[in-house]
Amino acid sequence: MKKTHITHDSLLLILLVAATFFFTSSSATSRNTDSKKKPLVPCKKLDLYFHDILYDGHNAANATSSIVASPVGGSGTRTALSPSFHFGDVIVFDDPVTLDKNIHSTPVGRAQGSYIFDAKSTYSVWLGFAFVLNSADYKGCITFAGAEPVTLKTRDVPVVGGTGDFFMHRGIATTSDEVVDGHLCVRVQIRFYECY
Amino acid sequence: MKKTHITHDSLLLILLVAATFFFTSSSATSRNTDSKKKPLVPCKKLDLYFHDILYDGHNAANATSSIVASPVGGSGTRTALSPSFHFGDVIVFDDPVTLDKNIHSTPVGRAQGSYIFDAKSTYSVWLGFAFVLNSADYKGCITFAGAEPVTLKTRDVPVVGGTGDFFMHRGIATTSDEVVDGHLCVRVQIRFYECY
Amino acid sequence: MKKTHITHDSLLLILLVAATFFFTSSSATSRNTDSKKKPLVPCKKLDLYFHDILYDGHNAANATSSIVASPVGGSGTRTALSPSFHFGDVIVFDDPVTLDKNIHSTPVGRAQGSYIFDAKSTYSVWLGFAFVLNSADYKGCITFAGAEPVTLKTRDVPVVGGTGDFFMHRGIATTSDEVVDGHLCVRVQIRFYECY
């Protein structure tokens, strides 16, 4: 009978231990997920717009960006190596960030940095810039770095770091753009998958 | 009696299993924390200085940095779009890194990369550079990328990667600067929160 | 006898619980390791080549890269601050990526971005570029950012983000180069340690 008895308790024990195993395993995973969120479930989301007006020599007051470099020919003079796609042009920008497509909306921060046309036979840019946010909802900076193949309707760009409310964050930004009131309006939908 | 007996053992079992659950859960979390440190407790810290002397046309021997690009006007000529804040200027630098504010101290490495003035109505820069360290204490590179609003007394800049002793590291650098002996001295206090 | 009996079951229980503890602990760790791989065991590897032909004023059709900026002297003219090491030169590139050293092999994508000569007394560059891959095996972008001390036979460069097949990835790229058929061929061996 003792044997049977042990078997009985052991069975209960094994079942409970098995349940414990699965429970603690998933718990450990979810704790990990709490601190460093995994795909499909962003730990934070943002949906913002920034507005770009390129300097053309006559709009210094309104311009928010400027070409600062372009291909240099063998003689040291500037040359258009791939004029159709602006290959080699470097543009620095200081663009207002808003909650909607209206450039006159109250800005919640600035998009500041540079983009570089880096394709000879299509439009594509390298992006290195930051959102510098200072609103009631968010204070802090977000670093974007990567390729943006602008001929696609939507593009994914890596978000590689942040400060303030975005301390140590990582994620993906989906960008798209349209011309609004004559200027370039870029929508940026950020999904953070690593928050702190 | 068997029922009571089972209840007795089951109670013990449940208590032990419950203890196991909390113990294994926290153990799993701390293991995760061991390999990827979370906020408030940096897994590594550095406190370094770098020294910048901008090329002015007459100091080629001592200069450690140079303007390499600036806004281009509609006519293709260089123009000062926002002269007060150097908007659009791109500066490349190769600055010595030291353990203190003395530019003549033995360097432990170089700060190499570029910064871009990217604000039209205040001073702010985009930073893309690396510490290339080669000292008795540290060998390896650290990548910095992000906004540095230089009008603030201290600024936080994302540290997004590293190599060598800083393999795969991430963290935050707090920068501040002062003029020492006529040159710009930048203090960089790095706290890594992800080490390997 | 009841006491003995309890002791017997309890012993079994303690052993099983202990086993459960170690099992669940290692399980939790390995789950964590599954989702975010740690050093020594990359979660993904790539071995690719890209090919660079610098624009010299006469090869616009074949050139894949161009100097776009260089040091500006006090008078506003371009000047060679450190002519031996190209200090301050900014090069934008759009280089084909292949599976071997042959520039004529079917490209699997492009290496697009910029490098900046950022050392006054040796050769070293800052790299900010992306692999934009579009092959049968891989579709997506990989962001590289950091120092590349090109005088070393092999260099480690941080991989700080990605999209598509490389969503949220991080890792290290080991680069080396050689001149093949008159052009610069760079081998890039990527080991990702964080996959999703």
Image (cartoon, coloured by chain):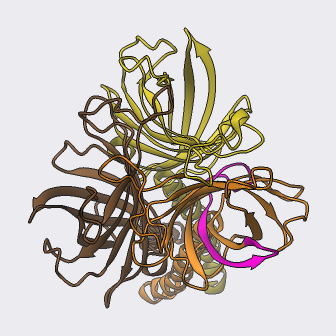
Chain colours: A brown, B orange, C yellow
Depth check: B59 or B2 in front? B59
Magenta region, residue range: B161-184
In the rendering, at what x and y percent does residue A47 appear? 23, 71
Question: Quick check: can you spot residue A10?
Answer: no
Depth check: A180 or C7 in front? A180
Q: Residue at x 56, y 39 (%)?
A: C191
Q: Is the magenta stretch mostly helix, strand or loop?
A: strand
Question: Above or below — where is C168 with respect to A88?
Answer: below
Q: Residue at x 48, y 80 (%)?
A: A164
Depth check: C79 or B118 in front? C79
Question: Above or below — where is B7 with respect to B31?
Answer: below
Question: Above or below — where is A75 with respect to B164?
Answer: above
Residue extending furthest top?
C181
Depth check: A42 or B23 in front? A42
Q: Residue at x 40, y 12 (%)?
A: C105
Horizontal side, residue A96 vs residue B21: left or right: left
Residue extending furthest left?
A181
Q: Magenta span has B167?
A: yes
Q: Magenta span has B171?
A: yes
Horizontal side, residue C68 vs residue B57: left or right: left
In the rendering, at what x and y percent does residue C93 appear? 44, 33
Question: Quick check: can you spot residue B154?
Answer: yes
Q: In which quarter of the image is residue A119?
A: top left
Please state the total of marks drawn on the protein image.
Answer: 0
In the rendering, at what x and y percent does residue C132 appear? 36, 36
Residue extending furthest front?
C75
Q: Residue at x 52, y 62 (%)?
A: C28
